C-alpha cells in the first residue's frame, strides 16, 4: 500500500504543471519537510531558486488580484487583459500568450532562457502590473526602441523588486539557476510581442 501511495504522489507531483496548464488552475503542492515542494527540487535535478519572506509577502498581497484575473474576448483571436494589454496572433499563427507561456518551463538546449515562477494567470497578472508601471512612468521602468519588427516596438525592462523568475538554459544550470527580479516586456503599442524574466 505504501508503494502505491508513493507512486500516486509521484504521478501528481510530475503531472501537476501539465494539469494546471490544461485546466488553467493552480493545484496544491506537496511539500517536503524543509518547506520546499518536491517539484521545486526536481525541476532541474537540483534546487530551483526560491524567494525569501519579502517575496512571500508580495505573493500574498497579489493573490486576490490573480484569482480575479480574467481575459476578455475581443474577437478575431484577440484577448484583452484587465489592464488593457491586447494579446493576438503572432507569426506562424502562434498566439502571443502561447509564445509567452514558453517561459513557464526550462529550455535546457538554449544557452540562456528566462523562466517565470507561477502559473499562466499569475504571469499574465504580473504583465498587467508591469504595464501599469509603464503607464505611470515608474522609475522602475527603463525603455528603448527595438531594432526588430515594424519599428513601433519598444523594449521595456521593469524592476519588480521581488523574485519573478530565474535564469535557466545551459548558462542558468551552470550558475545554479540564479533568481531574477527583472521583467523584459516588448510591446507594439498595447500589444505584447513577448515577455520573459531577464537579469
Image: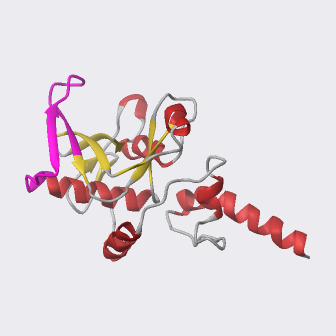
Q: Magenta stretch containing residue 149, yes or no?
A: yes
Single out the residue that lies furthest toward the right: 1
Residue at position x 57%, y 29% from top?
Answer: 109
Quadrant of residue 19 in the image?
bottom right
Label tally: 0
Q: Compared to 181, does 187 lie above or below?
A: above
Single out the residue that lies furthest toward the top: 147
Q: Is the image coloured rainbow, by chain, by secondary structure, or in one colour?
A: secondary structure
Q: Quadrant of the N terminus?
A: bottom right
Q: Compared to 71, does 96 lie above or below?
A: above
Q: Is residue 172 visible?
A: yes
- Residue 194 at what x, y percent from top left? 33, 39
Q: Is residue 109 left or right of residue 181?
A: right
- Residue 107 at what x, y percent from top left? 54, 36
Q: Is residue 189 visible?
A: no
- Relative depth, front residue between 82 and 54: 54
Magenta stretch, residue numbers: 134-157
Amino acid at each position: 500500500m505504501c508503494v502505491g501511495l508513493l507512486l500516486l504522489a509521484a504521478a501528481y507531483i510530475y503531472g501537476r504543471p501539465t494539469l494546471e496548464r490544461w485546466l488553467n488552475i493552480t493545484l496544491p503542492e506537496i511539500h517536503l519537510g524543509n518547506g520546499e515542494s518536491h517539484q521545486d527540487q526536481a525541476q532541474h535535478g537540483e534546487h530551483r531558486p526560491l524567494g525569501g519572506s519579502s517575496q512571500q509577502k508580495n505573493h500574498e498581497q497579489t493573490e486576490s488580484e490573480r484569482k480575479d484575473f480574467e481575459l476578455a474576448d475581443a474577437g478575431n483571436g484577440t484577448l484583452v487583459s484587465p489592464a488593457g494589454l491586447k494579446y493576438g496572433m503572432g507569426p506562424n499563427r502562434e498566439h502571443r500568450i502561447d509564445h509567452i507561456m514558453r517561459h513557464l518551463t526550462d529550455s535546457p538546449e538554449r544557452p540562456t532562457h528566462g523562466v517565470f515562477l507561477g502559473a499562466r494567470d499569475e504571469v499574465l497578472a504580473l504583465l498587467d502590473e508591469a504595464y501599469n508601471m509603464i503607464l505611470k512612468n515608474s522609475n522602475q521602468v527603463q525603455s528603448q526602441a527595438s531594432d526588430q519588427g515594424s519599428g513601433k516596438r519598444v523594449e521595456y525592462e521593469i524592476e519588480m523588486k521581488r523574485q519573478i523568475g530565474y535564469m535557466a538554459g545551459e548558462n542558468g544550470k551552470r550558475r545554479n539557476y540564479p533568481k531574477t527580479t527583472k521583467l523584459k516586456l516588448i510591446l507594439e503599442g498595447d500589444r505584447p510581442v513577448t515577455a520573459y524574466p531577464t537579469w
